[in-house]
Image (cartoon, grey):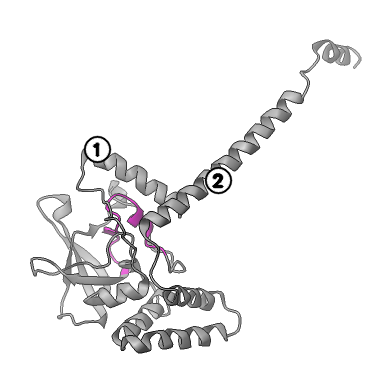
């Protein structure tokens, strides 16, 4: 996490000097939505395959073209949909990383979310993604839902992917009366932890536990904690370096005369 946050800061700072629109900033008190909150807010939760893009006058005007597979929440018409503000990845042309989501990462967003725009904006052609969407402001197509650093778009490459399983649960829980949501999640959690040891099951259970714990910390609190951890790590590294320097100073310099004598005695 600390590496991603520091990278985000560095990239955002460098972008802000040249192209302010590319970098993002969060409002005071901003909290990254929990996965349950993400499912509750989205108008459309869609499993879809990236098939292309609609070009625009500028790079930021391009729109992603997605072929719907399953609408987990909401309704979608037949045929491809367009998602504003995102585009195809072009790793061979230096336009992206080509990196897919880690199927076992269920808490943090795709690594591209921690660069520049603070949400994932580029996608490889052919990948299948679980999108959390809302209507675009112009009424034409869709746009990302969830806000900075949210898991609004993660690759899902199998039917039994943990993220797909959790999303189906969270959409169902978000649709239930608020008085029943906690009981639903607690029952699912209890059922999972009762199963024989399975690392994937335990990852799913851990994410449900995060939803039960309630809202995330504010981004300012996250940053403060991570920066403190980074400071402590740097201090520890510096202490080790100083100790190694002290040891090096205590090591006597080689005696040239002795070295020559040893050579002569061979």
Can you say which quadrant of the picture contains the C terminus? top right
Return the x and y of residue 247 as percentages of the image width and height: 73, 30
Choose between 226 and 22: the one closer to the eye: 226
Choose between 163 and 158: the one closer to the eye: 163
| Residue interval drawn in magenta | 108-128
Q: Describe residue 251's horizontal placement relative to residue 57 as left or right.
A: right
Q: Is residue 165 above or below residue 180?
A: above
Residue 70 location, quadrant: bottom left
Q: Describe residue 49's horizontal placement relative to residue 187 as left or right.
A: left
Residue 75 location, quadrant: bottom left
Q: Which mark is residue 118?
A: none
Which residue is label 1 attached to?
17
Choose between 174 and 132: the one closer to the eye: 174
Residue 238 location, quadrant: top right
Q: Describe residue 214's horizontal placement relative to residue 139 as left or right.
A: right
Which residue is label 2 attached to?
232
Return the x and y of residue 62 as percentages of the image width and height: 16, 57
Q: Describe residue 33's horizontal placement relative to residue 225 as left or right.
A: left
Q: Is residue 203 above or below residue 120?
A: below
Q: Secondary structure at mark 1?
A: helix
Q: Is residue 137 above or below residue 62?
A: below
Q: Residue at x 26, y 81 (%)?
A: 73
Q: Secondary structure at mark 2?
A: helix
Q: Earlier in the sequence, mark 2 or mark 1?
A: 1
Return the x and y of residue 143 as percentages of the image width and height: 19, 66
* 124 is within the stretch colored magenta: yes
Choose between 170 and 257: the one closer to the eye: 170
């Amino acid at each position: 996490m600390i590496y991603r946050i520091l990278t985000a800061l560095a990239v955002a700072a460098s972008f802000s000097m040249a192209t302010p629109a590319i970098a993002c900033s969060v409002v005071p008190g901003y909290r990254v939505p929990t996965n349950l909150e993400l499912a509750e807010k989205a108008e459309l939760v869609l499993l879809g395959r990236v098939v292309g893009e609609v070009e625009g006058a500028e790079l930021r005007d391009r729109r992603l073209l997605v072929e719907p597979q399953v609408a987990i929440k909401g309704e979608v018409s037949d045929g491809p949909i367009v998602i504003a503000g995102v585009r195809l990845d072009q790793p061979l042309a230096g336009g992206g990383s080509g990196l897919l989501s880690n199927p076992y990462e269920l808490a943090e967003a795709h690594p591209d979310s921690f660069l520049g725009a603070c949400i994932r904006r580029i996608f490889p052609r052919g990948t299948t993604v679980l999108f959390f969407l809302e209507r675009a402001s112009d009424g034409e197509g869709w746009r990302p839902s969830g806000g900075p650093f949210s898991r609004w778009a993660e690759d899902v490459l199998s039917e039994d992917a943990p993220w797909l399983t959790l999303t189906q649960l969270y959409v169902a829980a978000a649709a239930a009366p608020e008085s029943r949501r906690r009981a639903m999640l607690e029952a699912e959690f209890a059922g999972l932890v009762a199963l024989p040891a399975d690392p994937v099951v335990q990852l799913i259970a851990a994410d449900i536990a995060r939803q039960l714990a309630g809202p995330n910390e504010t981004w300012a609190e996250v940053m403060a904690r991570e920066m403190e951890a980074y400071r402590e790590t740097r201090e520890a590294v510096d202490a080790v370096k100083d100790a190694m320097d002290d040891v090096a100073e205590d090591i006597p310099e080689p005696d040239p005369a002795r070295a020559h004598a040893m050579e002569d005695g061979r």
